[in-house]
Image (spheres, rainbow, N blue to C red):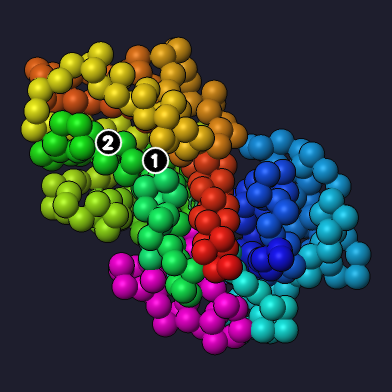
Amino acid sequence: MRLRLAINGYGRIGRCFLRALMFSPLRDRFSVVAINEPSDLESMAYLTRFDSTHGCFPGSVDVGDGRLRINNEEIQVFHAREPAGVNWADLGIDILIEASGRYSFRHELESFLGAGCERVLLSHPGNSATDVDRTIVYGLNHDLLTGTERIVSAASCTTNAIVPVLSILDQAYGLDHALLTTLHSVMNDQPLIDGYHHADLHRTRSAMQSMIPVSTGLARGVARLLPDLAGRIEAKAIRVPVVNVSAIDLVAHLERPTTVVDVNALLREAADGRNSGRMSYTAAPHASIDFNHSPHSAIIDAGQTRMSGDRLLNLLIWFDNEWGFANRMLDVAACWGERMA
Ligand SMILES: NC(=O)c1ccc[n+]([C@@H]2O[C@H](COP(=O)([O-])OP(=O)(O)OC[C@H]3O[C@@H](n4cnc5c(N)ncnc54)[C@H](OP(=O)(O)O)[C@@H]3O)[C@@H](O)[C@H]2O)c1
């Protein structure tokens, strides 16, 4: 039986999730029955049809009777700003894809359960580990899902990119300490030109004119998934004026010596083997735009691997922060669904 999904917040991730699902081999496992988004129906249909980053929707998008019809599938649309503003119970929602980014605390997320959703899958990390029942990076720890969870986080795009790489390095060489710098594309929480847009002053500055340092919970996010590395990872993030595709610059001090050739061979083997479909590897000369619409969570740029001495490693890892992450959310939803059966 198909699981009934709803999407709360139909922005970049909400729309990417829907598009990824519509053309996925996992398609038959789900029906999208509802979308809740403050914007109006016509605008929602328009931004489904036309996407400046991922191109035109390769199917049909219509509106009628207050519904969105995508590939002839009817989706009910709501415009509430509160979880209780939709009668989710009447819709029989098995999993709510929470992609508004507005809810991080358990008591907030439980409002969706109280309003009738069976389960919530979050497109960002919970405020703390205990605000969700599990934080899942598909490919790393999805086997922990039992199907009994009510609130699961699919972590973040950056966590999905870096955690598998750190885990592989730690197993092969022992990870002493690491520093991560995320170069992240602009997001809708930044203004196009300077404006009173956000309480964080960095996010009041024009997204397209500057590289802008912003706060990040990535170090905490890594420690949540790889507790043995807690206290040994630090991170910072810089928003850069590109509309999509991000990178992580990783500096890692290893416990055991190695070489550039050895590290690249290790990561290539992982990308071709057990991490296939989620990690990839390239030795070609690239610019970030080359990875737009890549479904991978991490692309190892082998030509940028460096070592200072035999223990200080520097890696460059690319990822499509929208499309890669939306595909991992879909993987988590499918895996969770299997376990519910
Ligand atoms: N973009 C990425 O690369 C990326 C990657 C991984 C994870 N994420 C995470 O995914 C979440 C969404 O990010 P995004 O980039 O998709 O943001 P976005 O483009 O701003 O989309 C969020 C959408 O949710 C709507 N919304 C706001 N409050 C709502 C509410 N109370 N109920 C229902 N809908 C509401 C927003 O409408 P208004 O604009 O009218 O408020 C907007 O249309 C964030 O937590 C983000 O950290 C983003």
Residue 125 falls inside the magenta stretch: yes
For label 1, the residue is 161
Residue 175 falls inside the magenta stretch: no
Q: In the image, is the residue at mark 2 within 8 Å of ligand 1 by its beta carbon?
A: no
Q: Is residue 201 above or below residue 266?
A: below
Q: CA distance from mark 1 to mark 2?
A: 12 Å
Residue at 60% x, 78% y is 117
Whole-percent x, y for residue 274 in the image: 41, 35
Indicate left or right for 93 with 258 as reference: right
Whole-percent x, y for residue 301 in the image: 38, 22
Q: Secondary structure at mark 1?
A: helix
State ligand 1's quadrant: bottom right
Q: Which quadrant is home to the N terminus?
A: bottom right
Indicate left or right for 244 with 306 as reference: right
Highlighted magenta segment, given as a residue range: 105-133
Residue at 62% x, 56% y is 14
Tell me the quarter of the picture where residue 265 sits.
top left
Question: What amino acid is labelled 1 in the image?
Answer: Ala
For label 2, the residue is 168
Relative to the observer, which residue lies in front, 322 or 265?
Answer: 265
Tell me the quarter of the picture where residue 341 sits.
bottom right
Whole-percent x, y for residue 128 in the image: 30, 68
Whole-percent x, y for residue 154 in the image: 45, 57
Tell me the quarter of the picture where residue 306 sits.
top left
